[in-house]
Amino acid sequence: MKTSIATVSISGELPEKLEAIAKAGFHGVEIFENDFLAFDGSPRDVGRMVRDAGLEITLFQPFRDFEGMPEPHRTRTFDRAERKFDVMQELGTDLVLVCSNVSPVSLGGIDRAAADFSELGERAAKRGLRVGYEALAWGRHISDHRDAWEIVRRADHPNVGLILDSFHSLARKIDIGSIRSVPKDKIFIVQLADAPLIDMDLLYWSRHFRNMPGEGDLPVTDFVAAIAETGYDGYFSLEIFNDQFRGGSPKAIAADGHRSLIYLGDQVRRRSGAATLSVAPMPERAVVKGVAFVEFSVGEADAGQLIAMLHALGFRKTAVHRTKKVSVYQQGQIRILVNRESVGFASAAYAVHGTSAYAMALEVEDASAALARAVALGAEPFHQPVGPGELEIPAIRGVGGGLVYLIDGTSSLGKIWEVDFVPTSDEGQPFPANLIAVDHVAQTVAYEEMLTWLLFYTSIFEAAKSPMVDIIDPAGVVRSQVVENRDGFLRITMNGAENRRTLAGHFIAEKFGSGIQHLAFRSTDIFKTAEALRANGFHTLPISPNYYDDVEARFGLEPQLTERMKAENILYDRDEHGEYFQLYSGTFSEGFFFEIVERRGYRGYGAPNAIFRIAALRKQIRPEGVPAA
Amino acid sequence: MKTSIATVSISGELPEKLEAIAKAGFHGVEIFENDFLAFDGSPRDVGRMVRDAGLEITLFQPFRDFEGMPEPHRTRTFDRAERKFDVMQELGTDLVLVCSNVSPVSLGGIDRAAADFSELGERAAKRGLRVGYEALAWGRHISDHRDAWEIVRRADHPNVGLILDSFHSLARKIDIGSIRSVPKDKIFIVQLADAPLIDMDLLYWSRHFRNMPGEGDLPVTDFVAAIAETGYDGYFSLEIFNDQFRGGSPKAIAADGHRSLIYLGDQVRRRSGAATLSVAPMPERAVVKGVAFVEFSVGEADAGQLIAMLHALGFRKTAVHRTKKVSVYQQGQIRILVNRESVGFASAAYAVHGTSAYAMALEVEDASAALARAVALGAEPFHQPVGPGELEIPAIRGVGGGLVYLIDGTSSLGKIWEVDFVPTSDEGQPFPANLIAVDHVAQTVAYEEMLTWLLFYTSIFEAAKSPMVDIIDPAGVVRSQVVENRDGFLRITMNGAENRRTLAGHFIAEKFGSGIQHLAFRSTDIFKTAEALRANGFHTLPISPNYYDDVEARFGLEPQLTERMKAENILYDRDEHGEYFQLYSGTFSEGFFFEIVERRGYRGYGAPNAIFRIAALRKQIRPEGVPAA
């Protein structure tokens, strides 16, 4: 698959853009005219820079308001084209994008436009250049790729072809089946962009909300599959206008873009077996079967607080590492590792972030296949020296530089507890609290990283993302989105904070980076759990009494149930599938906390309760330094 | 005019919100249910807090999905209402907002809904409460205030009335004339919100984009004028959902809201003479006739650099202050004051911001009337001790805490130069550069302050705001909007920076606040000006040669003209009214710069050239510390 990206898609000045694009692994780059115009070097200099970076210029764009102009505009427009042809020759590229005319003075008529393109093709041919025509979704006369294709067909010139753009076609919900009848040699290049499904003015949507394929909601895979069927084997080029990307890191955005194309190619190959896309095969998306463990890095000084909390939650120490200062606390299928090493990665994580859940292990069918896929998608593998005879568990770097271990039954999961650990029995014997599994892992990230990590998880693992939900913190909006698989074995909630005065933002600021802010454990009976927690001396997060009057009225609950919930600070929600109960711990270490949930068929995450949880947590954290909102 | 605002409109926790609302001068507050639920105190506590803050609770809201429910939902809905009535009685408020049903199980039918409201009214009456019905623009069966009114009419109960909301009516472009026939006593409360005109899904638009009346594009004044004609004399209450406000300062947002209502009342009073709104009369918006001077605060160390630049621009020193270290540099009608005082406000401004254009004087017809209006609209008046016999010029605090002097022909403008200053002649004699007036003042502000200052200027001065334009900085999007009056004597461009890596953001970060980032002077002949500048040793900002090839092709310019522009680093733009020429100085003091423009009928500000100007300026500022984007 030949990959390209438009310079307009990422932030920075031209040299930085080119460096980031090359580093991300793209083969080519579209030169967006303004990026070139604002740059000091000559077109020749820019061409050289691109080639020195190991890239090809796939397209020069945009050339606007060309076809259907009445005189005297028409003559001037052709003169303007000749000037752009000069620049292209100096740049060293042969393809220019002409987007459909939006000028109020332009005239309609397929044949008039075709005649203009025929002449432009003739002029381009003299210089060995080619002209691609793209229908803008808001073009004045042409806003549908089928009409653009008809113009190209009638222009009937070898140097004139069609440019397809997923956004323009999918935004207008044009039947993509129509692409299958375009000859592959008449598709000069394909541009790709996705976007969240929000019904709004097309131009505004396009200019501000585009994102990478797989990051939005448009059926970009269907679009590419239709193109693959034509036998097209040219460039797929990302053209993304996104306010957030314009302010983001060029390197990170370019890397996301490259991942999105590789992932897209893989999906299309699986669906259509399209050999023409020349996509390197990779293992399929890994099916997560559970969270095998979560590992905390702690210092000697604050290990006690975490361990006391684990005890109060009903966890017992069941094993210790053979050679490292790592203990395992277990309950049901949940294993929490507490790492007190003073050398190695966990210790380094502690030095930066303080006590933190810096690693999680996902159980998959085949860990090395999952690792191979992750690496093919640009994830950074992680290696750490292991002691003699100890297992090396495959791992990749995840959110905030933390680790995602990949662990399976064959190679490691069955063995790790035997090989690396020795059983032990705890000095403390807390009451077991009916906790059976990790229900979900909640990661807090800077808002501009959300799309990165959603794409990371959904491209490597068999999982889907939920629609975005706004969580109202007194100090600002926090965006929340969930990555989950069908069976609920992988559930990661992602909270994106826009400012540091929110609870989520405070966590990122104080922990010096994104990471796991809370862990939710699943209980088989939350009321029994609450009883055990009380016996263990656990402090549940106090919830405002006002909440219970409302929840009782809202859902028509039995007063008896509400009373019990109120006594135990349990929150309630319901969806069409069933009921949900939640309770929380207080916070420690700058905002980390635990949650316990009971699902009675319910599939959500209690989003309507988030404001109550936040209000209660803010009160706890305030003295440590959350400024009043 | 009775003013109110919903707690949901501003950020913070409930006590902070109430404090900010009271401080801003509102009479009442709508309690948004979630704000109350998340709060720890009982309804009685909240009621007491509100009253202690000197506020009245104008409304409790929202009560959702009420009318048209089939059994068994209907019974439960009425039970739910009774629970809310309990809360209202404890809060001490008599009015609840019922918004039109969006539930998929709800049934349509005007009479069914009317019967439900009749019963609800009966239940409310028993407790001395009232029920207001509001049509949501996306209600399932009722989405138009005319239909809501028909239901209220048929419910025919004294305790059931209509609630009007400008957003819901104006977003659907409903004829507001229909409001004039509603009896005033059946309008229980009026909610107000504005919004920028972007065509999108109504719910999404409403939840994220609402803003204060006058900050958006909806005809809110027409809406209120229609209501005033009914004789309505109740509360006007702001109900704003805005992501930016949710993360903003409670105090600043509340102050903006209060200003917007006072301004709105004033506009309606002028238009309709509506005595019922009980709006205190104030002087009309001040017509600005020019920028009388701009004053810089400088330190002894860096005064030389500014003065050298003024000389190079063709300014001559023409006067000095009688008692203070303030010099006047003049050219045409432009006066630049250079203040080197080491005590007083200018000196304090220098201590915080370094060399900066901390004050501007606007020439108006009647300075004391303009001041009175500004103060009535919540602006902070500024006083400074003056020496014996010196003039005190009325002033208010503006952007970044800087000053806006108000100066007129009668009281001060004619006299200031005679009374406070003595003429002098400059040691340097630069060539005059054909500069005749301040064309525009460019202020850079944090993005979240833009609406504040747009409302500040347009409510105090006779001026309109232009649509927002996106300026693409390599490090992010900068939003640009212009405040200008009809004759072009007041022209303020406002650039809102979202991150500190942009040129605008860098300025704010390094100057420790928003302020004037550049001054544009108008030339009668920019080529002659360029010649004089060259003779004076002025360094124009070098523009990329690529720009000129493009601009020539884009506008079909004569090559001779392009060559001249290129030689002088002059930029070009054109609109339907005429041509525009611009040139820039380099930067000094963390990003401040001068611009020179020539207008040949053109009415814009050269927005298409901004990316070239930014690229060129970034290169200059880089060594001083703008990080690579």
Image (cartoon, coloured by chain):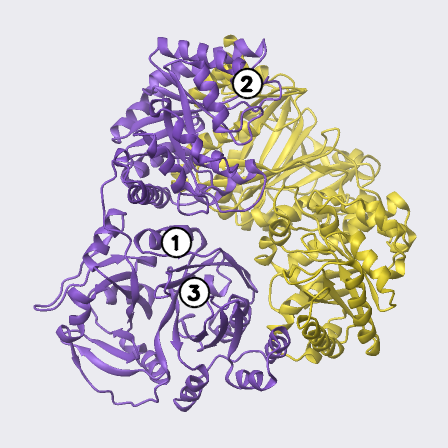
Chain colours: A yellow, B purple
Which residue position holds label 1?
B454
The image position of residue A21, as x and y in percent, is 70, 63
User: Is label 3 on the same chain as label 2?
Assistant: no
Q: Do labels 1 and 2 touch, CB within 8 Å?
A: no
A115 sits left or right of A623 in the view: right
Q: As displayed, is residue A536 above or below residue A229?
A: above
Front-lying residue, B346 or A462? B346
Chain of the residue where label 3 is placed in the rendered structure = B
Residue B155, image quadrant: top left
Which residue position holds label 3?
B507
Chain of the residue where label 2 is placed in the rendered structure = A
User: Is label 3 on the same chain as label 1?
Assistant: yes
Helix, strand, or loop for circle 3? helix
Helix, strand, or loop for circle 1? helix
* Separation of residues labelled 1 and 2 (CA atoms): 54 Å
Q: As displayed, is residue A602 above or below residue B318?
A: above
Q: Residue at x 82, y 36 (%)?
A: A365
The image position of residue A458, as x and y in percent, is 73, 42
Q: Quick one: label 1, few (<14), some, or many (20+) residues within 10 Å? A: many
Instruction: Judge depth for marks 1 and 2 and give the one in front.
Output: 1
Helix, strand, or loop for circle 2? helix
